[in-house]
Amino acid sequence: MHGTLDSLFHAERRPLAALTAIAQDWRGLTSRALEPNGFYEPAFALAAAPFLGRDAQAILIWSRQSPARLVGLFPLRIARRYGLGPNVLAGWLHPYATLGTPLVERDNADGVIAAWLTHIARDPALPSIAFLPTQTVDGAFCKALDRVLVARGLRHADFGRHRRAHLAPGRDRAGYLTEASGAKHRKELPRRRRRLAELGAISHEIVTREPDVARALDHFFVLEANGWKGSAGTAATQSEDTRDFFRAAVTGLARDGKVRIDVLSVGGRAIAATIVLRSGDTMFGWKTAYDETYAKYSPGAQLMLDLTQSVLADASVARLDSCTSAGHPLVEHLWGDRLSIADRLIGVRPERSAAFSAACALETMRRTGLHYAKALRDRLRG
């Protein structure tokens, strides 16, 4: 099988920051991806690389046809995840990304994934354990990965499985909100909106053009800085690196037509803003901020309702990933769909079965320790 793969694909490893040179090939791959990932769009990932991925690399899979075509992109880091334990080849993720699905061309996806695994197994500089964070368990990539792992007899395990809100209306787009949201919520939001309208005319603006996106991003920055994140010192504008990353990522995506910023205003004053990324037919609800002085009118939920209605009216959008934590109140009341997410550990070299078993035990211990540390922190704060 390996010989056949060698005749079809060529694999190489490069620093992530050096991938500007193949940005056009990368964009082409995103349009053919088996499963879209807005955080691995070149405009977003290359903006994050100098700030959040200085040690990040990528395994690239190319077709051997002429001209060669980029058919796989797997961002990664070699990480000491378990302290004194073995190194792990971890998919590259950072605090501003919530999905780690690699980009794989939908045609011959199994072959591309197999070529990736073969490259790791043959490279002595790479660990024998791969860790893929935040994968969509029921998504097309994981289904293809499962087929390849079973065919190769490779051991794997999922950790941290959870479900987050997801908008996937299918064909019944007109009746989606009625079916998905509770009766109480359907009544309460319009009542609060009527009260909000007493303060001034309400407008919902969808911004997509690059010059307008820069202005809308400023609205987001102000709203976030004046809210709880500003009080906690974690607002984007409170770090020069974070602010520059936001600007570079959002304006770069705007040039590619892959971002929108929705702004809710009352009497000409912006009171809520949300940044939505797009890749293929999928949108990703990246960031939301609102004016907390209007909290009794639920400005964040009002804007999310407007966003939902506009997405339902756009047949080119198949789904919208909330990118939120499980149980997040902003969208769980509006959307009836849930996306299953998990981290996946893979033993790449069958002969290193003991190393995989050790990694599974260490991963379990790590998560247990983090759980109790978080519980203790919350107890002390409370």
Image (cartoon, helix red, strand yellow):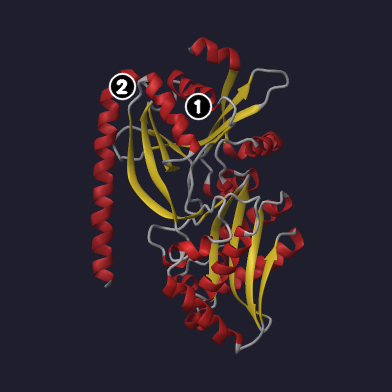
The structure residue drawn at horizontal position 45% and vertical position 30%, both measured from the top left corner, is 145
Element assignment for label 1: helix
Residue 337 image offset from top left, x and y in percent: 45, 54
Residue 198 image offset from top left, x and y in percent: 60, 89
| Residue under numbered circle 2 | 352
The structure residue drawn at horizontal position 38% and vertical position 23%, both measured from the top left corner, is 150
Label 2 sits on what residue type? Arg
Residue 272 falls in image quadrant: bottom right
Neighbourhood count class around disc 1 (C-alpha, 10 Å): few under 14, some 14–19, many 20 upward: many
Give me the disc on residue 149: none
Q: Depth check: give the residue in front, 7 or 303.
A: 303
Label 1 sits on what residue type? Ile
| Residue under numbered circle 1 | 113
Closer to the N terminus: mark 2 or mark 1? 1
Q: Is residue 254 above or below residue 198?
A: above
The structure residue drawn at horizontal position 64% and vertical position 70%, both measured from the top left corner, is 263
Element assignment for label 2: helix
